[in-house]
Each structure stands twice: as structure tokens, then as C-alpha cells.
Amino acid sequence: MEKVIITGNTLTLEEIAEVCRNYCKVELSQSAVDRILASRKIVDDFVENGDVVYGITTGFGKFSDVSISKDESRLLQKNLIITHAVGAGKPFDTEIVRGIILLRINNLAKGYSGARLETILTMIEMLNKRVHPVVPQKGSLGSSGDLAPLSHMVLPMIGLGIAEYDGKVLTGEEAMKKAGIPVIELTSKEGLALINGTQVMTAVGSLTVYDALNLVKISDIAAALSFEAHHGIVDALDHKVHDVRPHKGQIDTARIMLDLLAESKMTTRQGDIRVQDAYSLRCTPQVHGASKDAINYVKEKVEIEINSVTDNPIIFPETKEGISGGNFHGQPMALSFDFLGIALAELADISERRLERLVNPALSGLPAFLVEHGGINSGFMIVQYSAASLVSENKVLSHPASVDSIPSSANQEDHVSMGTIAARKSREIMENVRRVLAMEIMCACQGIDMRGNKGLGKGTKPVYEAVRKSVPVLTEDRPLYEDINACEELIIDGTLVKVCQEEAGEILF
């Protein structure tokens, strides 16, 4: 993409990935500009008339009953940002920070927040000129929005905080100056408009969903390679089995697996070698399919959220109202991201079981740990060990954050979502899953070679060949982390899905 046009209503996951990872430039649509100007006029009228509207002519949270004069409005907005920037922990990766800014721009572009046009254009310049605020990962309760991390996002806009520019971490003021972006002075409603929303959790979750949609494809490819390394029984993939239990993900997975394995000389039929396979092979459609259905559900919720108004109060230009509500509450995302983490964790759970069967001679019939001259060579013994560790860690991370709440702001904010914690956990789970799948693919390719490669499927053959270009057959022990890294990079850069689809284009993931 050359450019993403921000309308406030049409942002997609693909566009988010383009802006966050490929530095695609962004631009406001004229319709968005018109809406922004209309909502700002309403805010200005509230201030001029002295109307009592939360966060515009009053204080915040427990101080909502404190009146704020017109003269104090600018100081109120500045104080809001500097006192709320109390994040903790390591900073978010640059791609997440870009996602946070992008989603905040899209939210404000809907024209229900009352921020000035020049404030939103400043954020667009920061994206386009690559000024990235340093935003700590921790400190959000996920209700009243992602207040603490979003405040860190705003600091460089007003000449405070720290930011990364041109590969260096500078003061916010210096980064903005070097990029040629004037700092701004916030005015009525703007501080609240910039930090009261779910954009941090949604930025983290959006990129995680985007990556998860790729990982479900990889999980099917990994399972198909393991099928061949195990001489798996394809009868369990027959569409008749799945048509009588018509969950979409399950039906799709069975079809995809058969497409990947088409023409393979490494699979078997029921009764050829054994009557049935272990669950980790035979139930691949049921397990992968359930995760796919869950991930697609989360995708639907995220697509709603990225184009929603999550501010407070919400400005309605048509009726000239400022209504204080609770759209900043992250519960819809908190539940979704907990679900996402659980769905992803299961992909690694079953992957590790297929991997363990490969390295276990009692189950595979192959040399122990997939290496000749065992004893002097350990082969893939500790690969399974590492995979098991990641799977167990995922079990801990899968405990839902959304079931927790803790009151804040003198009990004014007495129920919170913990959605940002849920999003961060789901991303960590995703990274662990990706590593486990890389391990399974590497071991499956080794198992295929040790079994005697008699001819792979239309979909698995190009994947196997791509892996072997980066990872040669293991004949004696060598540092395996390098091989795992190479396999994982083939997942991250999209090579494995790409070669599979190029060589067997009829496979519709």
C-alpha cells in the first residue's frame, strides 16, 4: 500500500499491519476533516457558554464535581497528561506504538471527540515522519481507557517525555524538533480525547490477531508434515466425518489437510499399518478448527473496535450534546483477547504432542530423538523439552485477565477490564506458539528424511524444500537454536505459506 486514508470507519487489519510494519503513510479523508471540525465547534461552544460537561468544564474521575474555568482549561489538559503518564515496565515495540497512534487517529477522525484538527494532524505527522513515543507496557487497568500508556504517547506532542527518532531515543521535545513537527498546547477536552480509549489494548490485540491468522495456516502445514513423518491415516480427514459435525473451522481444516497431503506417498489408509492414529494426529481438524473459529470471532470483534468511538464524553454535533458514558471500558476486548490467548495456546498444545511422538522411538518407530548414533548425539531431545516449557508457560498465561477487577479513583471507577493485560498476554502466547510450530516443522522434516522420503504432498513438498534450504538434515549434533530461529523466520516473513500457495494454489486456507 502506498497510503492509508483515514475515514474513522473503514480501517482494516491489513492496513494496520501496513502502517505498523511497513511504515505506510496515512492521510485524513475530507469527510473526516469535516466531522472533526464540526465536533470541535461543539466543544468550543460548551466552553464559551459555561455548560457543565464532564472533562470539558469539570475535573476528571472523582473530581468530576469540580468546576473548571475557561482560563484554567489549558492547564487542566496539560496536568491530565503529565499526572497520568505513570506507566511501568519495558517499552512497547515500535510497531505497537505505531498501532496505538494510528488507532487513536482513527478514533478521533470519527468526529465524536472534539479534538482540534491540528492536534490530529500532529499525530499523523508523527506517524509519517516516524517519531515514536516511548510507551511503557504496564500500568493500564483497561477502563477509563488505557490512560497511563496513552499519556506517554501524548507527552512528546507537548514537548515532554521521550521518543525514538532516526534510531535514537531523545527527549520528546528534541525528537519533535529534529523531525520538524511543532509541539502543541492542548486545549479544552483534548487531553481527555487523546487518552480516554482502548487503543493500546486494541493495537496489541490487532497485530496479534493478524499474526494469529497466519499461524493457523502454519499449524495446518506443520500438522500435515507430521502426518507424513508418522505415516498418518488420512481416512480421519474424510469430509463425511466432518460434515456430520459441521463446525466451520473443523470442516475447513480437514479439507486443507487433504489438499496439503494430496498425492503424498507418505500417508496411509485405515488398516494399512494401524487402524487409527493418536488424537494429536486424528483430531487435528477438531482442535485446529476450534481455534480457528475462536480466532475469527475475535477478529470480528477487533474489526468493530478499531472503527468505534471509545471516548468520554462523546460529542454529538447533530444534537449539540456531550454525553458521558462508558465506551472506554475495555471489557469487549478483554474477553476477546483472553479467548484469543486460549485459542492460540491450544495450537501449541497439540503441536508439542505431535512433536513428542516424533522424537519418542516407542511411538514413532524412528531412531530415538531423530538422530543416528544416539548417545553420543542427543538429536532433538531438548527441542521437545523446550517446546514443553513454552506450552506450560502458555497454560499460565492463558489464565483470563478479564475475570479480575480492582476499584480505582476513590471507587468512582469501581469495575475495570484488565483488557490491556489480556492483550499483552495473548501476544506473548502467540510468540510462544510460533516457536513451538517452528520446532514441529523442523522435527517433522527430519522425521520425513529418516522415514525415507517417498514423495510428499502437493502442499507439503514446497514447504519441506523451503525448510531444507535453510536447515539441512541433522546427521550429528549442532547448535539447534540456529535451526529453530531459521524455521521461525520462515514463518514470520511469510515464506512457508507463500511457497505452499504458489506451488499448490488451489489450497484455500
Image (cartoon, helix red, strand yellow):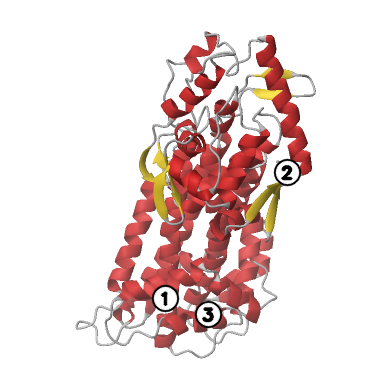
Residue 354 seen from this side: yes
Q: Residue at x 46, y 70 (%)?
A: 489
Q: Nearer the viewer, residue 379 or 60?
A: 60
Could you tell me how far apart the alpha carbons at marks 1 and 2 are, in whole angstroms?
44 Å
Q: Secondary structure at mark 2?
A: loop
- The three-letter amino acid code for the residue at tag 3 is Gly
Q: Quadrant of the N terminus?
A: bottom right
Residue 11 is situated, as x and y percent measured from the top left of the image, at: 68, 48
Left/right placement of residue 489 relative to residue 180 reads: left
* Residue at numbered disc 1: 442
Residue 65 is situated, as x and y percent measured from the top left of the image, at: 53, 8
Residue 204 is situated, as x and y percent measured from the top left of the image, at: 51, 47
Could you tell me how far apart the alpha carbons at marks 1 and 3 are, in whole angstroms?
28 Å
Q: Secondary structure at mark 3?
A: loop
Residue 340 seen from this side: no
Mark 3 vs mark 2: give the one in front: 2
Left/right placement of residue 383 relative to residue 195 reads: left
Q: Label for residue 7?
A: 2
- The three-letter amino acid code for the residue at tag 2 is Thr
Q: Residue at x 26, y 82 (%)?
A: 477
Q: Residue at x 53, y 13 (%)?
A: 64
Q: Secondary structure at mark 1?
A: helix
Mark 3 Cα within 10 Å, few/some/many (few <14, many 20+)?
A: few
> Which numbered disc, 1 or 2, marks the residue that appears first in the sequence?
2
Mark 1 vs mark 3: give the one in front: 1
> Which numbered disc, 1 or 3, marks the residue that appears first in the sequence?
3
* Residue at numbered disc 3: 271
Q: Residue at x 55, y 85 (%)?
A: 456
**In this rendering, is residue 190 above or below 99?**
above
